[in-house]
Image (spheres, rainbow, N blue to C red):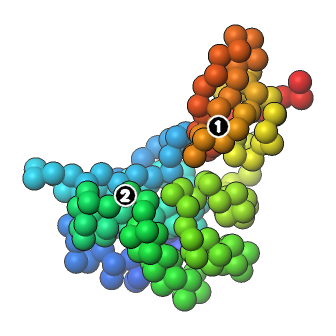
Amino acid sequence: MKVFDYIPEQAIPILQNWFQPYSFTIKITKKRSSKLGDFRAGNLFERPQISVNGNLNPYSFLITLTHEFAHLLIHKKHKRRVKPHGKEWKNQFSELLNELLQKNIFPKDIYEVLENHAKNPAASSVRDVELMKVLNQYSPPSNTIYLNELPQGAIFSINQNRKFVKGEKRRTRFLCTDVHSKKQYLVHGIAEVHQHDC
């Protein structure tokens, strides 16, 4: 399975065991600025699908894949009768993460932060700033800054275009104000941005 090329080798037997009973597809996508992965339940004519961004480092890829696989398991058990990131999903994702944590898969710094994350997982790993920081250390060097990482009030641009002021958080997005027009926009926390001094 091609997906196993994207994760730490020690995790492969665990995922093979997880995936074996289920019929679904895994799609490796190009980098997406608004999400790291997603789950689609499918219908009578198509199988459920998990997608994960192919640019993620192996540890981020594994955690994202595990996050989405937890959605698949909850869908199998409950269909649409429970909230997407409700207690059922949290418990399932925690259980899967704890199984991974029992193996020698993650470096010590990721292990410690992920162990804490597994106690009460957020709807998106990008909402756990400490987890994102430690995972980013294992990605290739880049000048990428995520909106999540900037303090409130910081001035930034996306793709070197219009400048915005970062405002308050609204779930996974931030209410940001265009410096010139004063219009407000919701910008996702994992949007890649360029910070400006003024």
Whole-Å distance between the Cαs marked 2 and 1? 23 Å
Q: Amino acid at mark 2?
A: Lys
Residue at left offset 72%, top offset 62%: 130
Residue at left offset 33%, top offset 78%: 18
Q: Which residue is mark 1?
A: 174
Quadrant where the image shows the N terminus: bottom left
Q: Is residue 88 above or below residue 183?
A: below
The tag on residue 131 is: none
Q: Is residue 9 at all visible to an observer of this figure?
A: no
Q: Position of residue 168 (x, y in %)?
A: 70, 38
Q: Is residue 132 above or below residue 174?
A: below
In this rendering, position of residue 136 left or right of residue 31: right
Q: Which is more toward the observer, 65 or 148?
A: 148
Tag in front: 2 or 1: 2
Q: Amino acid at mark 1?
A: Phe
Q: Position of residue 98 (x, y in %)?
A: 52, 82
Q: Is residue 121 at all visible to an observer of this figure?
A: yes
Residue at left offset 71%, top offset 15%: 182
Residue furthest to the left: 44
Q: Quadrant of residue 193?
A: top right
Tag count in the figure? Answer: 2
Q: Is residue 177 above or below residue 58?
A: above
Mark closest to the chain's N terminus, 2 or 1: 2
In this rendering, position of residue 151 left or right of residue 60: right
Q: Quadrant of residue 56?
A: bottom right
Q: Secondary structure at mark 2?
A: loop
Q: Position of residue 10 (x, y in %)?
A: 51, 82
Q: Which residue is mark 2?
A: 83
